[in-house]
Image (cartoon, helix red, strand yellow):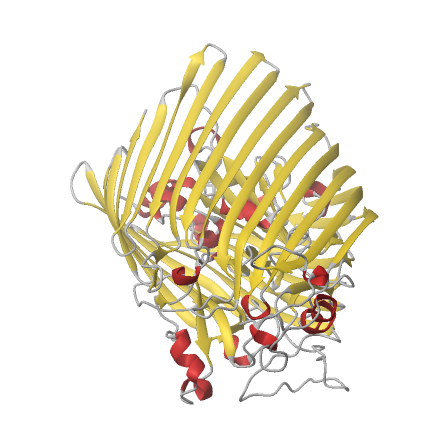
Amino acid sequence: MNRKYIATKVAIAISTVLGGPVLAQNIDTQSETVNDSAFEVILVTAQKRVQNVKEVPISISSMNQEKLLEANISDSEELSTYISNFSVNQSGQGFNVIMRGLGSGPNQGFEQTVGTFVDGIYRGRGHLMRSAFLDLERVEVLRGPQSALFGKNTTAGALNLTNAKPTKGLQGYVNLNYDFDFETTTVETAVSNSLSDNVQGRIALKYVDEGGYIENALSGNDEVAHETLLGRLTLAWQPTDKVDVVLSAQHDQDDFIGYSVGQTFVEPAIASSGAPILSLIGDYVIDDKVRKANPDIGEEQKGSFEASHVTLNIEYDMEDTMLTSTTGYQSYELIQSNDGDQSALALIYRPLGNEEYVQLSQEFRLTSAFDSAFNYIAGVYYQTSDLDYLEEFTVYALNSTGNRDFRVDSDTAAIFAQFDYDFSENWQATLGLRYSKEDKDGYRKLISVDAATGTPIVDMPLVTAPAIANSYPDGLPGAIFSSVVLGGQNIFDHEISAQRTENNFTPALNIKYKMEDAMLYASVSSGAKAGGFDSRANNPTDFEFEDEEVISTEVGTKLTLDDGSADINIAIFNMVFENLQTSVYDGSTGFFVENAGEATSRGLELDGRWAFANNWIASGSLGLLDFKWDEFEGAKCFQSVTKTPDNIEEGGESCDYTGKTNAFAPKVSGSVNIEYYTELSDSIELKASIDLIHKSDFYTNADLNPWTMQEAYTKVNARIALLDMEGSWQVALLGKNLTDEITLNYSTDMPLVGAGFYNVMADPGRSVSLQFSYNFE
């Protein structure tokens, strides 16, 4: 079998690791080979119309359904390990989504800096990252501002997910994955067929029984253990030959034991000191074992997450213009309890964290398909959303429970357009414009009550607590205790509300030059992320924060080389941010939001693939990143018993981060994938692949504490499979992190114990899985 035949066959079966131009919408109907290329044309919807990825002037990484299933990538956190300049990690409060060194923390008042869209519907809340991937057709990671077509809250980029659609013929699959190390079973299945001459249906189900990869010696559980069930029904209807209607309804249910994989770490100087607190903590080595959530005092970590998503898409073909209506409804409820100090110590416990969210959106869009030099996309968008968050957090040393009630209601309206004009056969200019208005109402109430009786602290005649037992054995009057003791920990009773209105205009301009085997482009774009109201702060002075803005420039090229046997994409970018929103630990018991002045993120992104020999394909991606704070005064200084910040400001209470980097901003990230195919018989093939995933040093805490630095690492994944030549079945062994690298993805100071104690989140160690898949039609 000659090289190009094999390469084409392989390209149909795989997607490139880490953002190579790798996704086809539907290989049977929308892929085609052009210019005798060895690879399939990759079709994406990054600009809300189906396009060849080589013609889209954006830095894009993408991955198709087959790669997602083969690598057992079940959520955005796992996906991000394969994508350069992109990371998703979980903290004790939620998810951090980072692109090009920029991202938002897990504050209930935040929208995300990296917007997530599923079938065109915006998912603006970090907890929606909990929804596992189900029957996805493809994933597109779009780097840089995407404001013109996708809207606000895409200042750093967007994650664009497309679910598989119904087919007119019978198609389906069953995929099984069993992880021996973490005792995790994953079953995913989908079936699609015509229900009548003009109606098709598709149903997809996924079940995950996850055992967890951290052993908790106190609870006896392996954490975080999940039992997850997802289901989606999609119906497609063609009432006329010009109208297409697609309705999908999905429900997710996730019950979990444990809440996060946080564990305790102490600085070596403390670890060797023999301090009595060490014996109470018991485990302070970063590995796969922890001691936290003490059941003897009633602590437990568990929760449930339930989400519903309904999408209605209607397309009306008016010959040279398509009218599209996209309606979306989504809601979720998260109920959880967790150990706030992530240790065996009785410091902070959160018995309740109940979050509810409802969103309704509507977009109308006109997309032209003129046989002329001019084309356009234009539309209007409206979204309304409501979020309610109720929380109780107990501080044992203060015998106090903080009752928090936070609400935010938002209404957004926008008008947008994108105009394409071909000056000649080779030159094209694109102008994007979007104007949006957003109204928000925010409310926050925090009352500290006695942990035993529920009586407001300020109303108690005397308050006794371990924190004051030595100095005031008989206690303190409630009003004094509230203002002095609780206030000393930056905890203040308050009830506050406010309204805000934002208006944003976010233009973008792109010029591209097309040749036979290359495309060059240059762009300048703007973006804005909504301001809002801080849910996490314990001080009423920290409530409202401003919107952040970005101006981005990018130049790039997309090349076809070696007679079509190689693709390479290169992008160079420079992004300047103002009023960047950051979530900052207050040094005591909570976090608050701070607008952090100005920052610049610049770098290079390169990805590609190469059929370099018979039966061999190499693919990969490289990201180079230089993030720098241009102006960031008044920031929190890190605390350590052995190290001192070199940027302490006059007065000694804060630090100047000007000229410093950011957390989660490795200078180098990327991966390389090598795949090999060979025939074992007339009906069976062998497929083997290896992935090398690399990140250079990066901080895992925004205060840039040297003890929270994750050193550079390279992880190795490998897979070997036997598959039917007709593509009907496949059996494989998948190994992840084969060198058993223990790496950190997030950290923060441990509350209330002083310098040198940290809560850290570690990634999974080595795992080996057995996979089986069966496709039918």
Front residue of this view, candidates 771 and 168: 771
Rendered residue at 46%/58% (across/down): 260
Front residue of this view, candidates 579 and 364: 579
Q: Is residue 392 above or below residue 576?
A: above
Quadrant of the rendered image containing residue 659: bottom right
In the image as oriented, which residue stretches furthest toward the left? 681
Q: Is residue 132 visible to us here? A: yes
Residue 655 image offset from top left, x and y in percent: 70, 80
Rendered residue at 65%/28% (across/down): 327
Q: Is residue 408 above or below residue 449?
A: above
Residue 551 image offset from top left, x and y in percent: 75, 58
Q: How many marks?
A: 0
Query: Residue 110 vs residue 423: left or right?
Result: left
Query: Residue 420 vs residue 66: left or right?
Result: right
Q: Quadrant of the N terminus?
A: top left
Q: Is residue 376 above or below residue 687?
A: above
Query: Residue 8 vs residue 478: left or right?
Result: left
Rendered residue at 38%/36% (across/down): 206
Q: Is residue 179 above or below residue 713?
A: above
Q: Quadrant of the C terminus?
A: top left
Residue 302 image offset from top left, x and y in percent: 44, 51
Q: Is residue 374 visible to us here? A: no
Front residue of this view, candidates 712 and 308: 308
Residue 363 image offset from top left, x and y in percent: 70, 31
